[in-house]
Amino acid sequence: MQTHQIHVSGAHERVDEIRSELFAFSEVLDVFVTGRPDVLVVIYTGRPRPGEWLRALRRLGYHTPARGRAMWPRPQRQSAGVLRNVVPHGDLGAGDGAQTAGSVQNHGAVRRRRDAA
């Protein structure tokens, strides 16, 4: 079982109708809405046929992006400040031996490493 996103204008309002139409394809198991109003997730088995799914929906009057304009959804970028707030100290995770282990309160690891040396 696999998933594939498709873009259909007004998908959330018409998901039940779209689901019924896509069930005509034997590989389609289900269709779900996403957090984006024009994006659906198709659950399928075997080989996906998104071009055929979208052509069938266009024939029925649904608006879908033209093949040349279809794009993968872009991931939302997070600000660089997010990581600075998570790791406020420059020495954490730097791989500097005792200082990193000591900063996470793992003094036993430092002792074992010194004993092994």
Image (tube, rainbow, N blue to C red):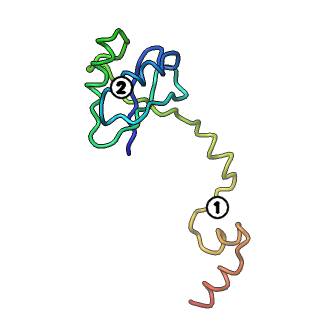
**For residue 33, side relative to residue 89 (left or right):** left
Residue 97 in the image: state x and y as whole percent.
60, 73
Cα distance in 3D space between marks 1 and 2: 54 Å
Front residue (pair 114, 14): 14
Point out residue 68 in the picture as x, y percentages from the top left corner: 26, 20
In the rendered image, the vertical position of residue 113 relative to residue 65, given as above or below? below
The spot of residue 61 in percent (x, y) is: 35, 8
The number of numbered discs placed on residues in the rendered structure image is 2
Residue 27 spot, x, y in % from top left: 31, 36
Q: Residues within 10 Å of mark 2 (few under 14, many from 20)?
A: many
- Left or right of 68: which side holds 99? right
Q: Quadrant of residue 63?
A: top left
Q: Check the image and name the residue furthest to the right.
A: 105
Q: Are marks 1 and 2 in contact (CB under 8 Å)?
A: no
Position of 85 relative to 14 (above/below) = below
Q: Amino acid at mark 2?
A: Leu
**Residue at the top extreme of this rendering:** 61
User: Horizontally, is 49 left or right of 14 in the view?
Assistant: left
Residue at image point 70% right, 72% down: 102
Q: Quadrant of the N terminus?
A: top left
The residue under label 1 is: 91
Say above or below: 3 vs 36: below
Residue 105 sits in quarter: bottom right
Q: Earlier in the sequence, mark 1 or mark 2?
A: 2
Q: Check disc 1 and report its element: helix, strand or loop.
A: loop
Q: Which residue is mark 2?
A: 22
- Front: mark 1 or 2: 2
**Figure quadrant of the C terminus:** bottom right
Choose between 14 and 40: the one closer to the eye.
14
| Residue 19: mark in rendering | none
Identity, as a three-letter code, of the amino acid under mark 1: Asp
Residue closer to the observer: 34 or 13: 13
